[in-house]
Structures are given as C-alpha cells and as structure tokens.
Image: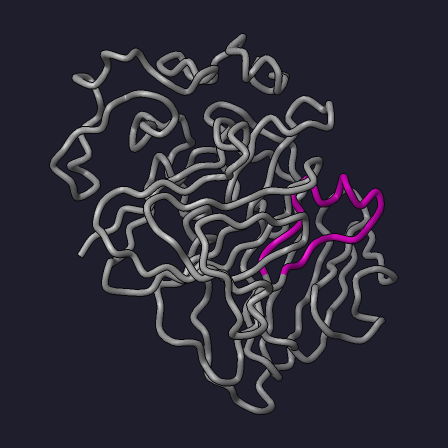
Amino acid sequence: MAKKLSRKHFLAGAAPIVAAAPIARLGWQQNAEAAAPSATHLGHDHHHAAMGHAAMVGEMAPSIERSAAIDKLLVPPTARPHQPGRVREHELIAVDKEIEVAKGVTFPAWTYNGTAPGPVIRATEDDLLRVKFTNGGSHPHTIHFHGIHPSNMDGVFEIVEPGASFTYEFTARPYGMHLYHCHATPLKKHIHKGLYGAFIIDPKQPRKPAQELVMVMNGFDTDGDRENNFYTVNGPAFYYARYPIVVRRSQTVRIYLANLTEFDPINSFHLHGEFFRYYPTGSSDQFEYTDTVMLCQGQRGIIEIDFHNKGLFMFHAHQSEFAELGWMGYFNVVE
C-alpha cells in the first residue's frame, strides 16, 4: 500500500505510514505535552511538547532504522593537504536497488554503490582524480562531474553499457563544493532514480578546522506521477529528526550542501535559532550571512555555523510541504 501512496493522499492523511503517527498533519493533540518524548537521550533533561512537525524528534519521528551506510554519507572523507603529483582513486558501481526512503516505503532506485545519494568523492585541488566506473545496472549510465575537465571525461559521450566499465581521469579543479550525476538520457529519470552524489575539491590552502558534514537534498516520487512523495537529505525522510546530529558549540560546523531534487524547481535550507555564513559553490571567501538559502537543481555551496547556544535546533526546507514530507531534522548542540 505504501509504495503506491500518492503525494496528495499522503498530505491528506489517507494512508498513514506508521500507525502511531498520523503524518497527515505531522502533529499530535494540543494536550500531548505530558506524553511528549523525553529528550534525555539527546543530552537534555527537559521534555518537548508534541505539537506539530517541530516536535517530531527521536523515537517520535517516523524514519527508518539507523543505517551505517546512511550515516557514512553525512561525514566526508578527511581533507588532505596539497601534494603535487598525488593520485586519488575511487571506484563507483551502478547498482539497481530497492531502498527504504521512509518508514515502510521502498523505492526502486538506481544507485552508485548502493545508496542515493552515492558516496562522497573528495580530492584536493591539483590531485589527479581517477574514478573507475562499472555499470552493474540494467540501463546505460555515465558519470558527469561538475568542474573543469577534458571533453572526453565529461560523462556525456562515453556511455557505459550494462556490464562495461570506464575510468574517468582528470586534474581536480577548481576548489569548491561540486557534485556528480549520471548524464544518460532520459536525464530526469536517471537523476531522480538516485544517480548523484557530492564531489568536494579542497583548496591548496586548507580551510580552518571544523566539524564537517555533507547534505545532499533530494526527493522521491514513489507512485510515478512526477511529483515527489518524500523530500529528504542524504536519502531517508525524517532521518535527522529521528537521529539528531550532535555538534559542539565550541567548534565551527561546516556543511557541504547540494540540491539534486528533481521535479521541483528549487529547494532550500533553513536553520532555526542561528545565522550562518553561506559561500556559494564554496569557491571564494565571499559569503552571505543568513539563516535561509534557496538552491535550484545543481546549485551547491558551503555553510559555516558557529552556534551560540546549546540545545536542539531544527533545520528544514522552508517550503513547508517539503518539511512535512520528510525534509527536516535537528542539530543537538552540546558543550
């Protein structure tokens, strides 16, 4: 039943995903404060009122069971100092795979290495990047990297048939937050099905130390009507509401943010209770100081947050429907 759940029915509450949570309004009764979940497991000793989607935290949030593969997508590989002549090798395999995008809801994805988004690829400017791609899926695929590279490494002409392989090799430049995705036709379907990921190129002069995170915004149309039923970050709906991201007040939090949402012209990131520095594409030291950014598909940037206060701080799309359909979570700020 859940697989064929339409976006309109989901919002109307015709078929709730979990029996304990009528997600139609993503809220509970006005008098539910007494029954609200304790937040002691998040490092707090108070309770949260269970009113509206802003109260869905911890076990109240209808997300999938904790996944090591999903957790790995949040934390990028460690940056390496600049080293002339270094080769960075990665291997990506296209795999057709059913993935769980919301509690009890699966999606027939096309993935790189079994997840949507695929693994984070990271290099330092001037590294020789070598990515071996093997198509283990059922359709022709490619990898198109955003950045500067030769035309025969662009992921447009070198179509890789099922069972075949191709090695992309180019010098990593320019520095910044980039992305990669399949560029086989129909392009919309190949991206929507899950063939995309984050691609970070670090500058020769290292960025200052920070707790680094990666967030790839995406969506999933589970009933084939070309409207997303769920909006997510790094894969499953409500994942970071179920498992808030622990960060330290004493350390800068750096988020590599990208939007790969299909079927909707824009997506957004909004942070509660704080402002952040937003560096478009992460390719310069110019930033905007704000609490909300809007990105069309393919846009990306770097967010840096210096939290002033402890506690649970929500982040979500500032399109309310996106938040109510899964694109929301929390930072748990501790000393």
Q: Measuring from the top left, give residue 72's x and y in whole percent.
A: 44, 53
Q: Which residue lies furthest to the left in this view?
A: 45
Residue 251: x percent and y percent?
A: 28, 65
Image quadrant where one finds the C terminus: bottom left
- Residue drawn at the location 29% of the way across and 56% of the way down: 307
Any magenta on residue 185? Answer: yes
Query: Is residue 192 rendered magenta in the image?
Result: yes
Image quarter hosting the N terminus: top right
Residue 192 lies left or right of residue 153; in this view the side is: left
Q: Quadrant of residue 7?
A: top right
Residue 176 falls in which quadrant of the image?
A: bottom right
- Residue 296: percent from the left, percent from the top? 66, 48
Is the residue 224 above or below the residue 164 in the image? above
191 shown above or below 38: below
Q: Start and end of the magenta stretch?
A: 179-198
Looking at the image, which is closer to me, 73 or 22?
22
- Residue closer to the observer: 16 or 314: 314
**Residue at figure coordinates x 52%, y 38% from the top left:** 232
Residue placed furthest toward the right: 157
| Residue pictured at 31% horizontal, 27% vertical | 55
Total marks shown come to 0
The image's colouring method is one colour
In this rendering, would 10 be left or right of 148? Answer: left
